[in-house]
Amino acid sequence: MSDETERPSSSIGLEVFETAPVAVVVARGPEHRIAYTNALYRETFGDRPLGRPLRDAFPDLAQTGYWDIFDRVLATGRPEKVSTGPIELSYPGTTEKTTRYFNFSVSRAALGEGERGVLAVLVEVSEQVGAAQNIRVLAEERRRALLRYGSLVNAGSQMVWVTGPMGGMSEPSPGWQRVTGQTWEQLRGDGWIDAVHPDDRAAIITAWGRAMAEVPATFTHVYRLRLAGGGYRHFAIYATPVRDGDNVIEWVGTSADIEQQWQADRREELLARAAAATADTRKLEEMLDALSHVIVPDVADACRVYLLPQGLDRPPGSPLTAERVVTRTRQGLPDLPEHRAEHLDPGSPLVRAIDQGHPLHAVFPPGNPPPGLAAPGNAPWLPERANSVVLLPVVVDGTTAALLVSSTTGDRQPLGRPEIALLRDLIDQAHVPLRNALEFQRTRQVALALQRSLLTAPPDVPGLDIAVRYRPSVLGAEVGGDWYDSFVLRDGAVVLTIGDVAGHDLPAAVTMSQMRNMLRGFALDREEPTGEILRRLDMAVQTLYPEGIATCILARVERPASGLRLQYSVAGHPPPLLVDPDGTARFLTGADNPLIGLVPDPAPTSAHEPLPPGSTVLLYTDGLVERREEDLWTGLERLRHAAAAVAGQPLGVLCDELLAGLLPTGGPDDVAMLALRVTDGRVAG
């Protein structure tokens, strides 16, 4: 038997309704296919074919919204009732459509074998409706109520409102009035727009006007509403047109508070943008700059980021110099000052936030920060008309490595707890490079302290002027390998030495200190040629540091009967520069030897060079002359010409002039210099 003709099986148990004094219909599944009708139903509505969807069996009712009730009941299991509902169709025995009125209820029914359906019970009340005019008025009101609130089932909103067909509020909305504080007189018509955030008004007016013109099945929009207690929250509109045939008679809508969901969605979206912006960035300052583009303008109107190179071992409450590496403001606001180092007094709110290690947050009237946010003597750090600020210390491994300062201005919603949490999550993107920066600072402090403890002042020797200079690298970890030393032996000879250990880190600094001390011991142990001393140093390095490689110059200023002379040996190091009294400058290349640690059985040679009064000897490390884009001899020639040009200057001035002329902004490598000048030819012995 086909679906079009079969009757429900007795297992369903519906025969009890066959003689009932009410009309009964059972529909099966989501398409509401007719599974059963009782006698009164067939008498009232005609014998509609079984198995056919109700929408197809009653095409005249397609626009009434009744089938939506069947959909909801089947989906939710909650029964629904309609009183005095008009049903207009061609009834049995009539040739034209007529309207009759029914009370009916719809509930979900189990049809066996796990299948569900809907059971509807109808009672005709046409005779009770009354006079024709009353029937029309009551039918219209009932039908409108059914359509209106049937559209809002499960909306779950705290605000329901009704507008006319062109959008003006037409009925009081207790929910809206309670949330926004607007009275009905303030709300009615287009007055509701006054409760919308000023920045969102243009968008909602445009979108709502388009909906009035195009009449979509549903209208959705998100905007911020001013609350009765102050501040704004995000609300989502859901509205639907109520139709009478082809005409829109009104709009029914809800406004639901979605602030928490909006905050969560914004957080995920901004974190995703931050991750994308910093994905290919490794340098700390570039990463912080990329994050500032995410913070401004989505979270704040302005932000600054300070790095705190003095954060290590700094007593709380003491002044510090912070390096402002990021400054960004929203378009249309005055720019904050350019990047620079900024001295911060102990009373500065920035220092207080750094010392306390947790955010300092303030909200205040636009342009009127409290006195505690404007410490005397500090440069202005808040934008004009700021209304809130968050000073967020970035703590890495217990040390405050940076400070993020964010603010909002004017009528914008002030920064609050959600924004503080979001800023913390965003700046966490830079946690790894900040940790690396801190580690570099610690390493550099230790290495520089070790170096400076070894780079001692030269001895005071009559007849000789000795000057030393040391300039650390301008790069992060480039520290640790260069050294110089000078001292007087028991025979009166003055030792000059300079060297460079391979590597630019803390281990290189440690190796350098040990090699320097060994060389001191070898030079003091025996009176022997400089080449032999370097041989012993080379053997010791190869034994104790199998992977170690270094360059070195060892020189002795001696006083034989013929006058002062320089005995020297060079192991892979740039050659000494001798500047004669007449200003002629030349390199000493008479004792070139391989690097220390390179040759298994070293045999360094020595050479001698006279030192007349007024002559100058310059020892230096390769950072003074080497450049990546040129060969070494180009740099050596540049040094020779520069030294000849300042040969007549006092020795200390000569050293400073060479550094300033050859490395005006510093270099990528450490530079050590040791200079000696013969003043009168007499050396104490």
Image (cartoon, rainbow, N blue to C red):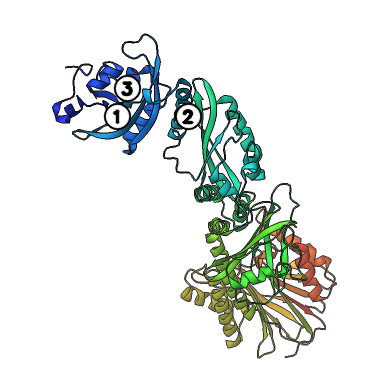
Q: Nearer the viewer, mark 2 or mark 1?
A: 2
Residue 113 lies in quadrant: top left
Q: CA distance from mark 2 to mark 3?
A: 25 Å
Q: Is residue 262 above or below residue 26?
A: below
* Left or right position of 76 against 239: left
Q: Which SS class for mark 1?
A: strand
Quarter of the image with the C terminus is: bottom right
Dot 3 or dot 1, earlier in sequence: 3
Q: CA distance from mark 3 to mark 1?
A: 12 Å
Dot 2 or dot 3, earlier in sequence: 3
Residue 387 lies in quadrant: bottom right
Q: Is residue 13 above or below residue 510?
A: above
Residue at the spot of label 3: 54
Q: Which SS class for mark 2?
A: helix
| Residue 629 or residue 22, whichever sits in front | 22
Q: Is residue 581 above or below residue 131?
A: below
Q: CA distance from mark 2 to mark 1?
A: 22 Å
Q: Which SS class for mark 3?
A: helix
Q: Residues within 10 Å of mark 1 (few under 14, many from 20)?
A: many
| Residue 122 or residue 308, whichever sits in front | 122
Q: Which mark is residue 120?
A: 1
